[in-house]
Image: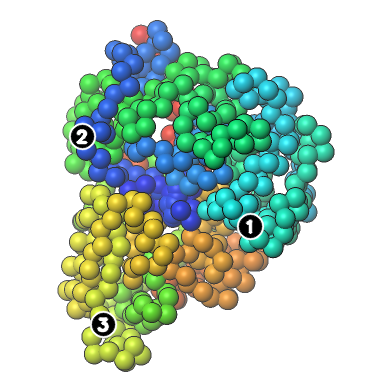
Amino acid sequence: MTTAVTEDSFTKSAGKQMIGFAAICVGGIALLMLGLSWASSLTSSGSGNADAVDADSRTITSFLRTEPPQLNSSLATDQVSGMVLGHVMEGLLRYDENNQLVPGVAERWEVTRDGATFWLRPEATWSDGIAVTAHDFVFAWRVALDPKVASEYAFILYSVKNGEAINSGEAPLDALGVTALDDHTLVVEFERPLAYFDKLVAFPTYYPIREDFYNATDGSFGSDASTLLYNGPFVISRWVHGANLLMEKNPNYWNPDRISIDRLDFAYITSDANATLNLFKDDKIAYATLLAENLNNAMGQDWNIERFMDGSVFYIEFNHRDDRPTRNVNLRKAMQLATDSAELVYKVTKLPGYLPGESLFPIWLKGVNGFFREEYPAPVARLDLTEARIYLEKAKRELGVSDIPPLVLLTGDNPVSNIQSEYYQQVFRKNLGLDLKIDKQIFKQRLAKMLSGEFDMVLAGWGPDYDDPLTFGDLFASWNLNNRGQYNNPQLDEWVAVAQTSQDPKTRMDAFGEIQQILFDDAVLLYNYERGIVYVTKPKMQGLVRRAVGPDPDYTNVTIIDG
């Protein structure tokens, strides 16, 4: 969900994110992440299940890449938290097995130019048997926008009337344009005309929270299984922090017949791809991701190997603050012309399923009649060292220096980030004579440094929060908290406003095309890749859903084939 997306966590927010969750920024989805020790990362739940897919107990055993940092839906920003929340919570709408929006707590809805109405199903209840009401949504949205809460995803509610004013402290919470007409009718007023609100309400920040339970937790809501109240298909019956997490079917879920399994046991927490592959070989987990070094091994095992693009894009983000040399557009353009994302993907990282980065807008996004990138081809800077060095000399003159001072490249502490940062360090030294100092940080510290601007360049990324190009298109708007380098371009802000308010698909896509061009012309970032995931599943487990938007992986549609 999500913050920025990163290879050490999928955060799709100011804190990815999360991405998505789908990300922290920040936040991101990760193949290799925090580098937990073997002892801590492979702590089992002790469930005693002999098989990863157990037909007798109707249990699926799997793993989490990292401990969910936050299960308070108003604060969560990372992909792992978003995935867990997507199994134990449900919003007004949800994504089905075909990745289409379908009714969730709302049995029907109507969206107009200026607002929306949702009619909640009377059979929707919390895990304690009390009905889910429209008041629970009003309360949750106010919590997320309360400036005292400091939710990094508050911005996703700015489409609701007075949302931004409330979050900035300029209006009271009760001024928010959402009303519970009665227990089962929720009415929303928009801040401005909006064409995609139904896509927003499936996001975790829009999930309901019941006020009496929230207040009873005394500030610890979402920190443990006992401080959560559930309205989704599963409940968390055990959460051993740093070790494992067990979900069980929610008997009070309004549609229990949709769920075929009784237990979802995340018995291991590990970011080690080789460790998860060994667990898969030993029939301890039902699903595992593959990397280049173990793909050939997997192909020789006659396993079910599948692939999908997870929707996220990765890049180097520049710091545009006045005290940083990377504020200079000619320096950025020199670096833009001195790199080759195809070399990074195919010769350096060699990760299966990845595509060279060319745009902030990934290839799967829809345009007017087809795919956005087919209708609006991305401008691409091809490797040109002669031109790059001309730009570099211009930058030196404008900065008043004979040599560019060492540039700090902030990066995560994981194998994929290590490979990339060392590659760029070599490339820029060889091609431009630039010195890059690698600042390697664990996930939490890297996010803190991104927020405070302690970098010249940072390895970052972004995954989608909802199924619309705007989830990428507004990322470098001057007001966006996920704009870590504080890029500020009034022209880009104007095109973002057009995309936010226009009801005409062609006008909106034209605006995204202009944003794509501005990001290229100003060399706002250097594109690395679009991430693909290659993974294996046990044949007895059918119906695992992978998606770019929404909880991923999604086990709610899984069935067990006996025999």
Three-letter code, disc 1? Asn
Work out how far the residue at label 3 is from the one at label 1, CA to CA, in angstroms. Answer: 40 Å
Three-letter code, disc 2? Trp
Q: With respect to residue 462, does 399 lie above or below? A: below
Could you say where residue 279 lies in the image, as x and y percent from the top left? Answer: 24, 26
Q: Are marks 1 and 2 in contact (CB under 8 Å)?
A: no
Could you say where residue 497 lies in the image, as x and y percent from the top left? Answer: 64, 66
Residue placed under numbered mark 1 in the picture = 167
Residue placed under numbered mark 2 in the picture = 38
Work out how far the residue at label 2 is from the one at label 3, CA to CA, in angstroms. Answer: 42 Å
Tag shown at residue 528: none
Give the residue drawn at x 21%, y 74%: 435
Give the residue drawn at x 36%, y 51%: 444
Give the residue drawn at x 62%, y 36%: 215
Instruction: Say whether disc 3 or disc 1 marks the residue closer to the N-terminus.
Output: 1
Q: Nearer the viewer, residue 270 or 463?
A: 270
Q: Is residue 299 left or right of residue 53?
A: left
Give the residue drawn at x 33%, y 51%: 443
